[in-house]
Every structure is written in C-alpha cells, then in structure tokens.
Amino acid sequence: MSWSNFNLIEVLNISGEAGVFARKSIPEGAVVGVFDGVAEIFTVDGQGQVDWRGHDGGMSIHLKLSDGILYAIMPNLGVGTSGIDYINHSCKPNCRADAGLLVVETIKNINKGEQLTLNYHDMDIIKLGRKCWCEDVPENERCVL
Ligand SMILES: [Zn+2]
C-alpha cells in the first residue's frame, strides 16, 4: 500500500484513464505521496532485457542494477493500488521522485484541478526501449522508457 496525501490529490478518470489531480493549489516542494511495494530481484541479460517472471515491468521502481541483477520494488498486487500509484508520465513533469525514488514531491506550484505527473524516465535504470507517449512532445524529443 502506498501512501498518498489525499488532502492535496485525488484520482480522477479522464476518458477512461486514471490520473492524479490536484484537489487544491499545491506549492512547490510538497510531498504528495510515497510509493511502497515488495522488494524483488530480476535477472538482466547482456542486452538489457529483464526477465520479469510475469510481473508488470512497467510498474517497477528500479533501485539498483548490479552484476546482472536488478533490485526493484513492485506494487503489492492484490492489496490494492490507490492514489499516487496512478500518477502518469510526462516528459515535462510537475513532480519528481526523491529519496531513493520512493517519495513523490512537486517541483512546481500546481493549480487546483491540474494533473500531477512524473517523468517515468527518471525511475528507470533499465530502459525498456519504448518511446513515451506524450502527445504534446515532438516524436524525436520523447524519452525512451
Ligand atoms: Zn513523455
């Protein structure tokens, strides 16, 4: 179970996709959530391909890669995801993950109703080689996740 500052954020479904939005104006530097999960290790081959053993690699937080072993945190599947777990990616985010990638804080003042985003690129030590999907960023400037 992650922790979310529900005084500041809420999860809304916009056109079928969940995202994290500001309930009120949020100043820069505010902690809006803390990720949590289960520590897992995965093997990585010489090409950087990860054996996820059925886990959703896109939801992992990569903490360290050492000698072909990826140390990661995976959400507690079945326990229930909420709040900050739904923060979406942006190449131009208004939040960042700090303190070992687990604490999400704002890096700008955020207006009430604005969506909070995080650049997933910064979470990944191992790139999966897929371009991000930001429609407001030209194709050649999109980061590779
Ligand atoms: Zn992007």
Image: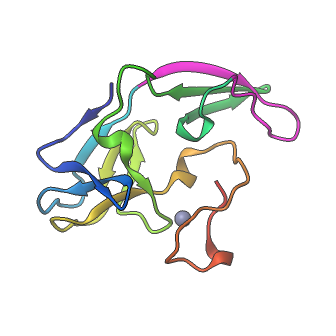
Residue located 79% across and 25% down the image? 67
User: Where residue 55 appears, x then y in whole percent?
Assistant: 61, 27
User: Where residue 72 appears, x then y in whole percent?
Assistant: 58, 28
Taking the image as shown, residue 44 lies to the left or right of residue 39, namely right
Q: Magenta segment: does it hold 99?
A: no
Residue located 66% across and 25% down the image? 54
Taking the image as shown, residue 24 lies to the left or right of residue 17, namely left
Q: Quick check: 5 above or below 133? A: above
Q: Magenta segment: does it hold 42?
A: yes
Q: Mostly what secondary structure, the magenta segment?
A: loop
| Front residue of this view, candidates 19 and 69 | 19
Residue located 34% across and 45% down the image? 104
Type of colouring: rainbow
Q: In which quarter of the image is residue 126?
A: top right
Taking the image as shown, residue 101 lies to the left or right of residue 144, namely left
Q: In which quarter of the image is residue 37?
A: top left
User: Where residue 19 appears, x then y in whole percent?
Assistant: 34, 53
Residue located 75% across and 28% down the image? 51
User: Where residue 70 appears, x then y in whole percent?
Assistant: 68, 28
> What span is in magenta?
37-53
